Amino acid sequence: MQLNMLAWRSLSRNRRRTLITGFSIAFGIFLAVTFTGSGDYSYTSMIDTGAAMGQGHVSVAAVGYNARPALSRWLPDPGPAMEIARGQAAGVYPRIMGQGMFAAGARNVGAVFLAVDPAREHAGHNYFVRSIVEGELFAEGDGRGAVIGAGMAEKLNLRPGKKVILTVTDRDGQLTSELFRVSGIFRTGDRAADSGFVLLPLDRVRRTLGYGTGGVTFVAVYLDDQRRVNEVAAELALRLTSRQDVEVLTWRETQPDLSGLIAVDRLFNYLLQLLVGMIIAAGILNTMLMSVLERRRELGIMMALGMTPGQVVRLVLIESFWLGCLGVVMGIVLTAPWFHYMSQTGIDLSRLIGQEYSAAGVLVDPVMKLRLYRESGAAILAAVFTLTLAAAVYPAIRAGRIMPVDAIKEK
């Protein structure tokens, strides 16, 4: 208690310097919350959007399908995997994804198709369904409806009600064709997706490929919180160990380009925050060192009266701790209004990057927002106190080595 009182007296002695140092800590918190919150929001948004473009946060696929996608690699009975996944996920969908040639009249174009069950599909887990701008999703899983991108509709001169023919290689490697009728057109804003992606009815595609009544290429698993990906994938892999024909993959394996992009961006984010932290720590070091040097005679007298070097070291560290607490309080006052505005409204960057900016094949939200996970906030607070105390270690050691006799003689 006595050391705490001495620490507060020392900090209040030069209030201007204390407030300036506290503000530097507060500004560091402001920057850390901005950088970390922007990353938490944008990474989560990109991961969820990428998952909604087909393969989910976690997918259970035929062995080898992800490495070399081919319609000859398929799961005859995905039922057990789906049953296990339902207890872990917000949505579980059987799907078939492959490549084929789509033709209308004399025109044709190669595209990726995703066969879905319209009775199961949820717009929140299917980016193409929620991007339909004309017509609607086909209603029958065994029907002949097709939802195509706006770019493909333009290339093939198609509109709802028009016919399109799919030519594809079935599970046995034989060419086969099927007639579909456009039921809807989607527009995602990504040119590649709008020009080369088609939604088809699952049961009809099963018949066309010879998959029988339940065959799929993978089961897409969607989570409410993408941070649980590794946990859910490990649980599924453990419970499916008896199935030698399946493998459990996370979005990092199914979308390696997106994973690499996020990893690099996150690394630069951390490096930038580290540099900011080092600058702030240098300011704290300067403040604490100046405080110690100015009080050499006072500290020498304290030691002559019985204070041990260890107590002097603790005194300086306590001062640093309370300086960190002051900085955190000021940081909350400075950051709270900004965070509230950015989490609710954000800054629209569409004029700079456009409405159709994409990275690694995934559309990026043009509105910059902040979202701070609980562990991210705890990490920021831990980093603030760690840097504050670490910056005070050298001044504390200098204070503990003061020779009382020499210090008392100083004027």
Image (cartoon, rainbow, N blue to C red):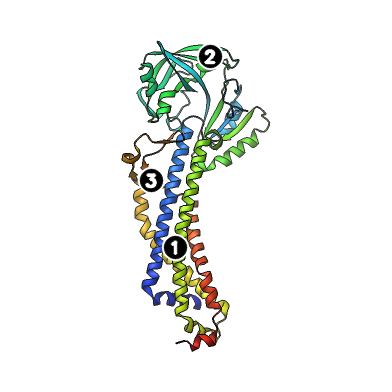
**In the depicted view, which residue is nearer to us: 203 or 355?**
355
On-image quarter of the C terminus: bottom left
Residue 291 is left or right of residue 347, and the answer is right
**Whether label 2 touches label 3, CB < 8 Å:** no
**Label 1 belongs to which residue?**
280
Real-space CA distance between mark 2 and mark 1, rounded to the nearest whole angstrom: 64 Å
**Label 2 belongs to which residue?**
208
Type of amino acid under label 3 = Lys
The x and y percentages for residue 193 are: 43, 27
- First of labels 2, 3 by sequence position: 2
**Label 3 belongs to which residue?**
369
Label 3, secondary structure: give it: loop
Bin the neighbour count of mark 2 within 10 Å (Cα to Cα): few under 14, some 14-19, many 20 and up.
some
Q: Nearer the viewer, mark 2 or mark 1?
A: 1
- First of labels 3, 1 by sequence position: 1
Label 2, secondary structure: give it: helix
**In the depicted view, which residue is nearer to us: 62 or 102?**
102
The x and y percentages for residue 337 are: 34, 54
Bin the neighbour count of mark 3 within 10 Å (Cα to Cα): few under 14, some 14-19, many 20 and up.
many
Residue 134 is left or right of residue 321, and the answer is left
- First of labels 2, 1 by sequence position: 2
Type of amino acid under label 1 = Ile
Q: Nearer the viewer, mark 3 or mark 1?
A: 1
Task: For residue 107, say whether it is visible.
Answer: yes
